[in-house]
Structures are given as C-alpha cells and as structure tokens.
Image (cartoon, helix red, strand yellow):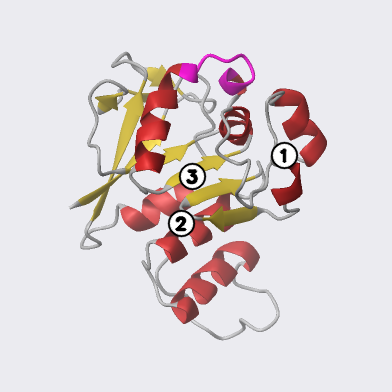
Amino acid sequence: MKQILVFIFDGYADWEPAYVCAQLNAPGTGYAVKTIGLDRAPKVSMGGFRVTPDFTVADYPRDAGLLLTGGTAWLERKNDAVLPVVRELVRCHIPVAAICNAVNFLAENGFLDQRRHTGNTLPFLKSQAPHYKGEAYFVEAEAVCDNGILTANGFGALELAKEILRLLKFRSEQELAEWYAWNKFGLYSPGHKGRTPSGL
C-alpha cells in the first residue's frame, strides 16, 4: 500500500487536498492517505475540523509522497520544522506537492530555483520568500509539475489534484480529462449534456 502524507497544522486549508485525497483514498486504489504534523497534538483546520496526525516529522514513512497544504501559518514561519522531511523526500526523488502559501516555503528554501513552478502571483511569492531565486521559472498557471515537485496557487486545488494523479499515473489521460471536466464544469456545461459522470 502506497501512502500519501498530508501536512496539517492549526489553520490549515482543509479544502485544498480534498479532490486528490478522495481519489487516492478510495477502496482498491493501492493508496492510503495519512496525515503528518509537527507533533501528535490534534490540529484544527480553517473549517473547524479537528484531526490528530497519524505521523510526526520525527516519525513518518520515508517512501510516502507529501502534500503541503496552505494556511497563514506559513506566512508566520510556524511550519519551518517540516523542512528536513521535504529535503529528504526531494533527495530521494519522492513527489512533494505544495499549494497556496506552502509554495512560499518551497521557494524560500531553494526548491524552486531551477524548477518550473507557480504560486500566488510572482510579486507575492517574492515578498514572502526573500531568498527565492527562481523568478525565471515562474509560470502563470493554476498548477505546475516539474521533476517531482508540484505547485499550485490558492485557487488551483483541482488542477493540483489533476497534476498529482497524472504524475502517479493514477488514471489514463482520457479518464483524467473527463474527471477534471466534471469537477470543473459540473453537469450542465457545454459538451457534457446527456453523459453520465464516472469516477466521482
């Protein structure tokens, strides 16, 4: 069973990992979604969900992928202790994803200096990551994947999910496109009339 770790902390944006976690954690996929925190104390999300982490930064499966959720704690540098986990996974070529303010953390610590990436606008990213040197690699897109690191802006939760599923070869390109279209445009968008959604 392959595991995906979602990094949680007080005030984490609980909706951002929802699309991809619902897909990967479904029965029979071969994946299991777990949570990781700086410690084992329960964390309360932005939406009020109280979750006790399955793992901590000192005790986690070394072969699991990692998703860093957004939240204001990144702006306050409260999550810096997750850095050794990120470094180890990147060193071992294990996928790491970040969305919204978590992208600033990757930028500040040099992970995006030579990889295509996105974020909550380039000026904002630069303002929050003074040691960032990857401006030439910034892409104005909802989500970007480059060499095992995935980034998304705060409005790109669905796009990040699509890029993660593509990287993991979780669905065929046709299935992935259909899944994305249903979630992006709903039942009544042009071109989808009369079709039955699958994999929701």
Secondary-structure class at tag 3: strand
Instruction: Give me the residue at 44% from left, 53% from top.
Output: 20
Secondary-structure class at tag 1: loop
**In terms of depth relative to the viewer, which is nearer, 169 or 8?**
169
What segment is highlighted magenta in the picture?
73-80
* Residue behind mark 2: 164
User: Spatial distance from mark 1 to mark 2, Cα to Cα?
Assistant: 19 Å
Secondary-structure class at tag 2: helix
* Residue behind mark 3: 97
**Image-based side of 101 in relation to 84, left or right:** right
Q: Amino acid at mark 1?
A: Asn
* Residue behind mark 1: 120
- Say few, some or many: other residues with alpha carbon within 10 Å of mark 1 (under 14 / 14 to 19 / 20 or more): many
Sequence-first tag of 1 and 2: 1
Sequence-first tag of 2 and 3: 3
Determine whether label 2 and label 3 are within 8 Å by CB.
Answer: yes
Q: Main secondary structure of the magenta part?
A: loop
